[in-house]
Image (cartoon, rainbow, N blue to C red):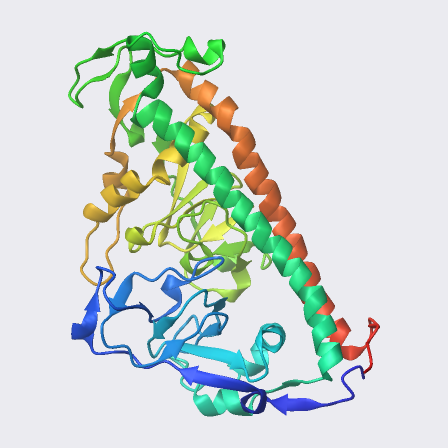
Amino acid sequence: MANDGQVMPLGDVAHIVMGLSPKGDTYNNDGVGEPLLNGPTEFGSIYPSATLYTTAPSRFSEPGDILFCVRGSTTGRMNWADRRYAIGRGIAAVRAKTGSTDTYYIYSCINHYLDRLLALTSGSVFPSLSTGDFNSFEIPWPDDNRRCKIVKILRSLDDKIELNRRMNRTLEKMAAAIFKSWFIDFDPVHAKAEGRDPNLPSEIADLFPEAFEDSDLGPIPKGWTPGKLADVADNPRRTVQPSDVPPTTPYVGLQHMPRRCIALDAWDRADEVGSGKSQFKQGEILFGKLRPYFHKVGIAPVDGVCSTDILVVVPKLAEWHSYVLSLVSSKAFVDYTDSHSAGTKMPRTNWKDMGRYPLALPPKPLAKAFQDHVAALHQRIGLAVRQNRRLAGLRDTLLPKLLSGEIELEVEHA
């Protein structure tokens, strides 16, 4: 075999730092102390996003470490530490003893042999992994040159995936900026009212009025209508059992949805989950209703089913799609849902409250103009999502072939 049959216990080649939760009275949401990661809810597509801080951290991860969930139903989820974090008992930090290249190699091996590692968990109701489990877990360990070559190939694919994700965030910000300018700040209306050029194509500028009028919402553009989200969007109820759909049907859970990013490029299969789920169709909008302050909103990249902690939002007419998507993914709307959520430890919002969100609704021709103007940005996001899925599949297919020697590598010898 390409690795000459050599395997190494993870504890021999990596440092394993098991998290230890600080005392509860040291937590805060004000950014004081060290950012704290307690579990997978803080994991985003690229890096974590801590919502808690602690003034008395117990254990740390370092930049470049592998962050690994070690407790509960999401045991096995991984991400990278982009900075120093305090880590609670739900997280372990893993780093190679020999540098960042080998840390990436270890990440690839853990990801490929994850089922073997998870087989070591104890506890049927609340599975967990211990330090001993990690230390004894064996992975292939070819020579230095071969590990370096393998990492170079796999990292080139991951770098492209991350580049696509960053591009998607930029495209999303562009669409959000246009939405805010047109429909929240009413910049074109202000410009025309003040005799200034709105800096828009004439066919779009002509759709904006030149004055405001009073309404129950305060001053709104003349001719617009005071309304609410439910006037332009619905929440269809399509509950199904996983057994009622093909086993390969994509399944999206809250853990798959990144924060503050509408591009969803991760999902599992329906045969891996139980209990009733909600059906959705490609292009529909998914809104995480559990702990809405996590800001998990995205475009469904495929037909599939999702957790019942995710609401499916569908515009009533096609020309309202980009408007509704931009609205429900905005910080103002997410803050509104958070303030109207019920429950102390596990707050949830609901469609009834979401549908009441007050709006100054533009005429349909302007909504369509926005759709035509912004839809290309959202389509590019969808294309990048599909490319990322193909790249991830290629990466996962290559690793065992590289390890086994099925794909030969030109190894440099000293």
Question: Residue 204 at what x, y percent from top left?
Answer: 45, 13
Side of 217 relative to 364 (left or right)? left
Q: Is residue 300 visible?
A: no
Look at 48% across and 57% down and name the residue there.
45
Furthest residue toward front:
414
Question: Residue 305 at what x, y percent from top left?
Answer: 48, 51
The relative height of residue 17 versus residue 329 in the rendered view (above or below) is below
Question: Residue 196 at what x, y percent from top left?
Answer: 35, 10
Q: Quadrant of the N terminus?
A: bottom right
Question: Residue 368 at what x, y percent from top left?
Answer: 46, 20
Task: Report which quarter residue 48 is drawn in.
Answer: bottom left
The relative height of residue 310 versus residue 26 in the rendered view (above or below) is above
Nearer the observer, 295 or 344:
295
Q: How many marks?
A: 0
Look at 17% across and 14% down and name the residue there.
214
The relative height of residue 190 versus residue 147 in the rendered view (above or below) is above
Q: Is residue 384 visible?
A: yes
Look at 29% across and 52% down and name the residue there.
293
Q: Quadrant of the C terminus?
A: bottom right
Look at 49% across and 73% down and name the residue there.
65
The relative height of residue 51 versus residue 367 in the rendered view (above or below) is below
Side of 147 relative to 209 (left or right)? right
Task: Report which quarter residue 393 is drawn in.
Answer: bottom right
